[in-house]
Image (cartoon, rainbow, N blue to C red):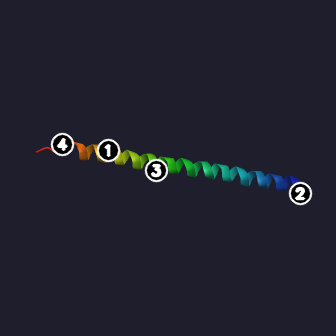
Amino acid sequence: MNLVSNGITAMVTLFAVVLGGWLSTRSQDQLWQREHVRQWRDIRLGAPANE
C-alpha cells in the first residue's frame, strides 16, 4: 500500500511540475507577443505619413 501511495504522490507532483512549466511558457509567449505588437505599433506611429 505504501508503494501505491508513493506512486500517486510522484504522479501528482510530476503533473504539477508539467502544468507549471506549461503555464509559465504560455505566459511568456503571450508577453512576447504583446511586446512585439507594441513595438511594431510604435514603429508605424513614428513613421512619416505618405501624402
N-term-proximal mark, 1 vs 2: 2
Query: Circle 2 sits in a helix, a strand or a loop, which is it?
Result: loop
Tag 3 residue: 30
* Dots 4, 1 in contact, CB < 8 A: no
Label 2, label 4: how many angstroms apart (C-alpha)? 73 Å
**Which amino acid, mark 4?**
Pro
Residue lying at 84% horizontally and 55% vertically, measured from the top left: 4
Between residues 39 and 21, which one lies in front from this camera angle?
A: 39
State the image coordinates of residue 8 (x, y, percent, origin top left).
78, 55
* Residue 30 shown left or right of residue 6 in the figure: left
Mark 4: which secondary structure?
loop
| Amino acid bearing label 1 | Trp
Question: Which residue carries the number 1 mark?
Answer: 40
- Residue at 51% in and 51% down: 27
Task: Name which of mark 2 and mark 4 comes first in the sequence.
Answer: 2
Of labels 3 and 2, earlier in sequence is: 2
Q: Which amino acid type is shown beneath numbered disc 2?
A: Met
10 Å crowding of disc 4: few (<14), some (14-19), many (20+): few
Q: For residue 39, which quarter of the picture? A: top left
Q: Position of residue 29 (x, y in %)?
A: 48, 47
Callout 3, which amino acid? Gln
> Pointer 2: what residue?
1
- Report how far apart the C-alphas of labels 3 and 4 lie in the structure: 30 Å
Q: How many neighbours does mark 1 have within 10 angstroms: few (below 14), some (14-19), or many (20 or more)?
A: few
